[in-house]
Amino acid sequence: MSWINDLDALASAGVIDFDAPAYIMGTRPRYYGNPALETIPDTLPQMNNQPKTDEFKPSKPKTGNPAWKKWLFGLMATAGIIFGASKLKFVKNLAGKITWANIKALPQIAWDGIKAGWKSLTGLFKKTTP
């Protein structure tokens, strides 16, 4: 029945000009025009302790990242620095190989260096049989 009340409220407010529920259900209209029903007041009662403006105040402020995340990031950064330092030897060797004569071979030299680094990395995880 709430949709009927809603449509009657629309008719009472002058939004529609007929008995919409009767029209939808195919029955004889109960009224024509705008009936004098109770209207909804424009101002709603205010609840107590409501803010005047829209604001968000968290009950507990965040203090930042937990310690385990900081330690994990530190370990990952240290491992990255160590890995990068070990590859500086590769860069020095690559710089010695680059000349104007073999500039066309540069992609192959770089690819060989990448493959060598990958093999050395995967070699750490291979099983060795005693």
Image: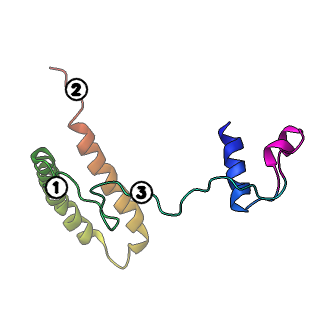
Magenta residues (range): 18-31
Q: Is residue 15 left or right of residue 111?
A: right
Disc 1 residue crowd, few under 14, some 14–19, many 20+, Cα 10 Å? few
Q: Which residue carries the number 1 mark?
A: 61
Q: Nearer the viewer, residue 58 or 95?
A: 58
Q: Residue drawn at (73%, 61%), measured in percent from left and top?
A: 15
Q: Is residue 23 magenta?
A: yes
Q: Residue at point 80% right, 48% down?
A: 20
User: At 31% across and 64% down in the image, what residue appears?
Assistant: 55
Residue 127 - label: 2
Residues 22 and 100: in front is 22
Disc ID at residue 30? none
Real-space Cα distance between discs 3 and 2?
75 Å
Residue 29 in the image, given as x and y percentages of width and height = 86, 45
Image depth: mark 1 or mark 2 in front: 1
**Earlier-in-chain disc, 1 versus 2:** 1
Residue 16 against residue 95 in the figure, above or below? above
Amino acid at pointer 2:
Lys
Type of the residue with mark 1 = Pro
Q: Is residue 7 left or right of residue 46?
A: right
Total count of labels: 3
Residue 6 relative to residue 33: left or right: left
Task: Give the CA distance from mark 1 to mark 2.
Answer: 49 Å
State which mark lies toward you, 1 or 3: 3
